[in-house]
Image (cartoon, rainbow, N blue to C red):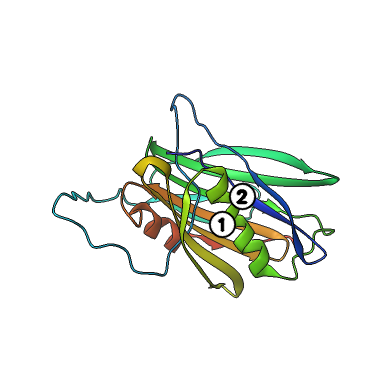
C-alpha cells in the first residue's frame, strides 16, 4: 500500500493555498506501510463468497502522548515520527505515532499545529483539504467524505482505496482550534477492522487555540 502520512491543507485568507503536504512514516525494516484516510459514514460493499475476513487485533495497549495532546489504545506501542515542515514562509510542526502491524495494516494518530497566521475559520475547507491531500499523496482514491463533529470540534471521515487493489485506509481528521488531529487505520477490508478500536479509544487532551 502507499505510504502513510499526515496531510496538511494550508489555508490563507479563507482559501486553500493549493499546497498539500504528506509526511511519510516508514518504520524499519518494513518496506512499505499504508495509505492515510478516515472513518466512513457510508455503506460498504457486501462481502463476496471469496472474501475471508479475519478478526482484527484488539487495541489494548494504552498510550498517552508525552506532550499531552491525546490518549489512545493501539494493538502495540506506537513509534514516533516528528518534524517541522516549511511551506513558503510558514513552518508547521507535527507529530505522528504509528503502530505498524504488517505491510497492509497500520494504526496512526497524528497531530499538526498550525501557526496563528494560518486562517482556520473555514474548518470544512481545512478538513476537506487534508483528506484530498492524503488521497493525492498516496495515489489512492477518496471513496467517501462525511463532515461531522468530535467532542464539539469539526471533523471529517473518509475512506481511501489504495492503488492496485492493495487495501483501504480509514481516516478521521479533526480540527481543534489550530491543531489538526488524524486517526488512521489501514487494512485489506473496507472498512479496515483496525479503525474501530483506535477511534473509540482516542481522546483529545489539549490543542493549540
| Mark 1 surroundings within 10 Å by alpha-carbon count, few (fewer than 14), some (14 through 19), many (20 or more) | many
Question: Could you say where residue 96 lies in the image, as x and y percent from the top left?
Answer: 58, 44
Q: Position of residue 197 (x, y in %)?
A: 38, 58
Name above or below for residue 124 compared with residue 65: below
Say whether disc 1 or disc 2 marks the residue closer to the N-terminus.
Answer: 2
Residue at position x 49%, y 53% from top?
37
- Residue 38's disc number: none
Residue drawn at point x = 34 percent, y = 69 percent: 43
> Which one is nearer the viewer's eye here, 129 or 119?
129
Q: Judge left or right: residue 111 versus residue 135.
A: right
Q: Which residue is mark 1?
A: 131
Q: Is residue 11 above or below residue 124?
A: above
Considering the image in quadrants, where does the C terminus appear?
bottom right
Q: Nearer the viewer, residue 16 or 121?
A: 16
Which percent across, then down, holds residue 183?
51, 55
Residue at numbered disc 2: 7
Q: Residue 205: x and y, percent?
A: 61, 62
* Position above or below: 176 against 77: below
Amino acid at each position: 500500500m502507499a505510504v502513510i502520512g499526515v496531510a496538511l491543507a494550508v489555508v490563507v485568507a479563507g482559501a486553500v493555498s493549493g499546497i498539500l503536504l504528506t509526511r511519510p512514516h516508514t518504520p524499519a525494516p518494513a518496506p512499505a506501510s499504508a495509505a492515510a484516510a478516515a472513518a466512513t459514514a457510508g455503506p460498504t460493499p457486501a462481502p463476496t463468497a471469496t472474501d475471508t475476513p479475519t478478526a482484527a487485533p484488539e487495541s489494548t495497549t494504552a498510550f498517552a502522548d508525552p506532550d499531552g495532546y491525546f490518549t489512545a489504545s493501539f494493538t502495540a506501542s506506537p513509534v514516533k515520527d516528528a518534524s517541522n515542515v516549511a511551506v513558503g514562509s510558514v513552518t508547521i510542526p507535527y507529530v505522528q505515532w504509528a503502530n505498524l502491524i504488517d505491510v497492509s495494516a497500520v494504526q496512526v494518530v497524528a497531530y499538526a499545529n498550525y501557526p496563528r497566521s494560518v486562517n482556520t475559520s473555514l474548518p470544512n475547507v481545512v478538513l476537506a483539504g487534508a483528506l484530498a491531500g492524503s488521497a493525492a499523496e498516496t495515489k489512492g482514491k477518496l471513496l467517501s467524505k462525511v463532515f461531522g463533529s468530535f467532542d464539539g470540534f469539526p471533523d471529517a471521515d473518509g475512506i481511501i482505496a489504495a492503488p492496485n487493489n492493495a487495501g483501504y485506509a480509514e481516516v478521521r481528521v479533526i480540527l481543534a482550534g489550530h491543531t489538526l488531529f488524524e486517526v488512521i487505520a489501514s487494512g485489506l477490508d473496507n472498512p479496515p477492522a483496525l479503525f474501530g478500536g483506535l477511534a473509540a479509544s482516542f481522546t483529545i487532551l489539549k490543542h493549540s487555540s
